[in-house]
Image: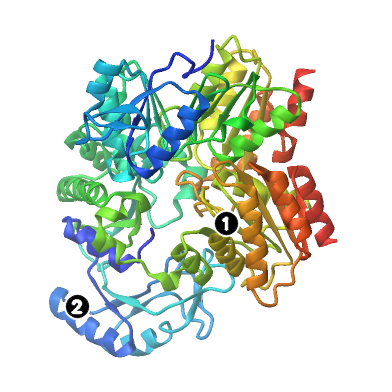
Amino acid sequence: MSVLVNKDSKVIVQGFTGSEGTFHAEQMIEYGTNVVGGVTPGKGGQKHLDRPVFNTVEDAVREAGANVSIIFVPPAFAADAIMEAADAGIKVIITITEGIPVKDMMKAKTYIQGKDLTLVGPNCPGVITPGEAKVGIMPGFVFKKGKIGIVSKSGTLTYEAADQIVKAGFGISTAIGIGGDPIIGTPTKEAVKMLMEDDETEAIVMIGEIGGNYEAEAARWIKETGNKKPVVGFIAGKTAPAGRRMGHAGAIIGGKDDTAEAKMKIMDECGIFVVQSPADIGETMKKALS
Amino acid sequence: MNIHEYQAKGILEKYGVTIQKGIVASTPEEATEAAKKLNAETGTEWYVLKAQIHAGGRGKGKVKETDSNGVVLAKSLDEVAPKSKAILGGTLVTHQTGEEGKLVSKLLVAEDVYYPGENEPKEYYVGILLDRAKGCNVIMASTEGGVDIEDVAENTPEKIFKEWIDPRVGLQGFQARKVAFKLGLEGEAFKNMVKFIHSLYAAYDATDSSMFEINPVLKTSDNKILAVDAKVDIDDSALYRHKDIAEMRDKSEEDPAEVEASESGLNYVKLDGDVGCMVNGAGLAMATMDIIKLSGGEPANFLDVGGSANAQTVEAGFRIITKDPNVKAILINIFGGIVRCDRVAKGVVEAYKNIDGLDLPIIVRLQGTNAEEGAKIIQESGLKVTSAIVLKDAAERVKEALA
């Protein structure tokens, strides 16, 4: 088993023929991801990267059997793309787009409530199950196959964690980039839960940052369910000033619960192996598993 | 994006929110003219002069040069010019500005709304913001207006009421009534508050705001409900569909280096430390700041050069970081994915040569695609640049550079 995406995933790219969509679709195909086509309204019937282009997600589902979608649509149209994928019956919707207005995301998140699907992102690097499928923009070679799951709000920090895990002698089962926006489809707890329930995952790396309560919520859930697998955790932004947005739309300290210290304290109390330095993720995983 | 009180009130008024009326002025003469006009329009004989800066605590804050407060009352037309003069052009220091304070270039001349009458005026708090955990907006209201809402939350949380708004249907009538009842209002004041909350939410929703803080909301002695102050934060990602609001951006309120960085497409936040840093990705950038601190330094900035770091962005980053005289060393931390480390390394070497008088120790940590080729380019460049591959080494090099 793996989480969210695997070798059987039939992936479509929304925003297929745009420059971002084209570049990353090529990279995904090269990695071995089963990309069955893409969607660009008005270009249905054409071929792109040797794969069919559809006008609608509905067509892609009906004609190519798509069940996973990755979205590179520009911010102004991205929420609409999410809702279109949901309406067409896509099961896993991964949204890479950064800068979607909060109001649009609120609408999209409400729209998908109660539907049998998982939205990952927006503003995330995507999801990778090494050796099976890369549905994202991460450098695939960093992620060697193994038994450590990763959940992270950040892109390059996810690569950093994966690299350390691999150098420590382990590998990755699935890495889920949940995204750095204030409203995201899969909060930390939901992503951790998937990895806790996954047979192939033996331990988890959980990386958060300042702002919001997702990490604290996940930590409490991990404790309540009996710390079934070791979790190594880090929160970026201990040195970030209050009230300033640090790159990610969601990375802002609005109150005392938003700080890295407050989150790390709760994580520590919930039995998570908290690292103070992001350079210690790999080493700490070694200790946690010994 | 933050905007000034006078701009925020302009937006509120457009959506039918009742506000304390005011006119903005840049000189003492304009202030007197504004006061005359206000007198004609509203009959007010007292005038509140409010410094327009992007920071709270103006009333208690002091203008460095004149010792005037940032918000003062002029009890006659004659007082308006001298009292305005004591604020305009001065540096206002409040608990939110830091010691350096902020230059006041505009004043809001506002009507006096605390006039005596059948009832005592009473202040309330009404805010609207995004509840991230619930994924919807929430209206927050309190009977404790005119004070810091964080203090109310800390000391008397039972005095804050919340009403969550369902994104599918928006604010409903019963919710506005609930808030007004919980604030203990009745009669005419109750009706006015219900209307106030409806208009306020309409303004919030229509402008893609991410925060409204109306503190205080005043019940006047004749039962009107007015926004006396207004703090408005607009969702940056939605500014593309609000050109009129985007134009309200006041760059003089921002750090000049931050303005320059944003014009080069870089995400930069200036901090007070001594080690500059340049990183690809926001999370890794924050983590790099944390590493600097653990190595015994203090981060001088947050700088995310984004996913496509190249010679131009690296050079722009160098120029911005080195403007800060406190910077004693620079740590560049790039995790190459799509970005190739050898290209970034070439960019660093080129930028270093292009910038005259750059004499700071620079630690470059490259990891990921072509990291070793990148390290080789750095080592062979003959520049005062040290290279590291593992994050731990980078931290050690920072420690050495600071020693």
The image quadrant of residue B43 is bottom left
Q: Chain of mark 1?
A: B
| Residue A256 image position (x, y, % from top left) | 56, 44
* Residue underneath mark 2: B38
Q: Secondary structure at mark 2?
A: helix
Q: Callout 1 environment at 10 Å: few (<14), some (14 to 19), or many (20+)?
A: many
Q: In the image, A276: left or right of B189?
A: right
Foreground residue among A283 and A255: A283
Location of the C terminus of chain B by quadrant is bottom right
The mark nearer the N terminus, 2 or 1, is: 2
* Residue underneath mark 1: B303
Location of the N terminus of chain B by quadrant is bottom left
Q: In the image, A14: left or right of B357?
A: left
Residue shown at 31% from the left, 22% from the top: A113
| Residue B90 image position (x, y, % from top left) | 47, 83
Specify whether disc 2 shares its chain with disc 1.
yes
The image quadrant of residue A116 is top left
